Amino acid sequence: MLTYAMQDETIARAEYDLILSTYGSVRPFTNIIRAEESHMEALLPLFEAYGIAVPADESASLLAAVPTLTEAYQTGVNAEVNNIAMYETFLDQDLPDNVRLVFESLMRASENHLRAFQNRL
């Protein structure tokens, strides 16, 4: 679960970075990309605590350009919906308290990000 969560957060950050590179400094991407970086940082102590190797960042190979800014906002909506669903699935499992706490926090953040993207559509 930790590896999957890190990969998901890494891909989201890369998607938002590509959108910012394409369309310039547009909100909410400018704020949310920083949040994605903090999500990745929140996961790192769990990798260390459980002796799990942090996955390599291969996100750049998975991205495609988004043709319009409206589609970029929809990409953000889709990414956050999928992220929330992932954390809901993880939280249905029996988890150590430290993992549960981080996953709950990251899911709440994704719910906020989702609203920010939906407000742009």
Image: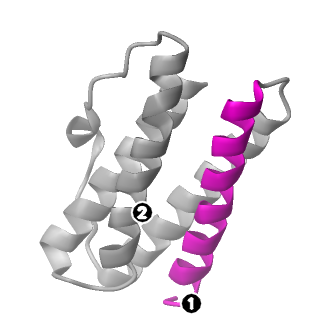
Q: Residue at x 74, y 37 (%)?
A: 100
Rendered view: 90 above or below 94: below
State the image quarter where residue 93 is shown.
top right
**Left or right: where 77 falls relative to 100:** left
What is the secondary structure assignment of the residue under circle 1? loop
Residue 98: x percent and y percent? 68, 33
What is the secondary structure assignment of the residue under circle 2? helix
In magenta stretch: residue 118: yes
- Which of 62 and 2 lies nearest the eye of the viewer? 2
- Which of 73 and 105 lies nearest the eye of the viewer? 105
Q: Residue at x 48, y 9 (%)?
A: 51
In the image, the segment drawn in magenta is: 96-121
Residue 50: x percent and y percent? 55, 13
Residue 78: x percent and y percent? 55, 61
Amino acid type of the residue tagged 2 in the rendering: Ala
Q: Residue at x 46, y 12 (%)?
A: 52
Rendered view: 115 above or below 33: below
Rendered view: 4 above or below 32: above
**Left or right: where 12 falls relative to 79:** left
- Which of 77 and 102 lies nearest the eye of the viewer? 102
Amino acid type of the residue tagged 1 in the rendering: Asn
Q: Earlier in the sequence, mark 1 or mark 2?
A: 2
Labelled disc at residue 30: none
State the image quarter where residue 116 is shown.
bottom right
Labelled disc at residue 35: 2
- Tag 1: Cα neighbours inside 10 Å, few (<14), some, or many (≥20)? few
Residues at marks 1 and 2, CA–CA distance in whole angstroms: 18 Å
In magenta stretch: residue 83: no
Q: In this figure, which residue is indicated by the disc labeled 1?
A: 119
Q: Residue at x 36, y 43 (%)?
A: 10
**Left or right: where 68 falls relative to 112:** left
Residue 12: x percent and y percent? 40, 52
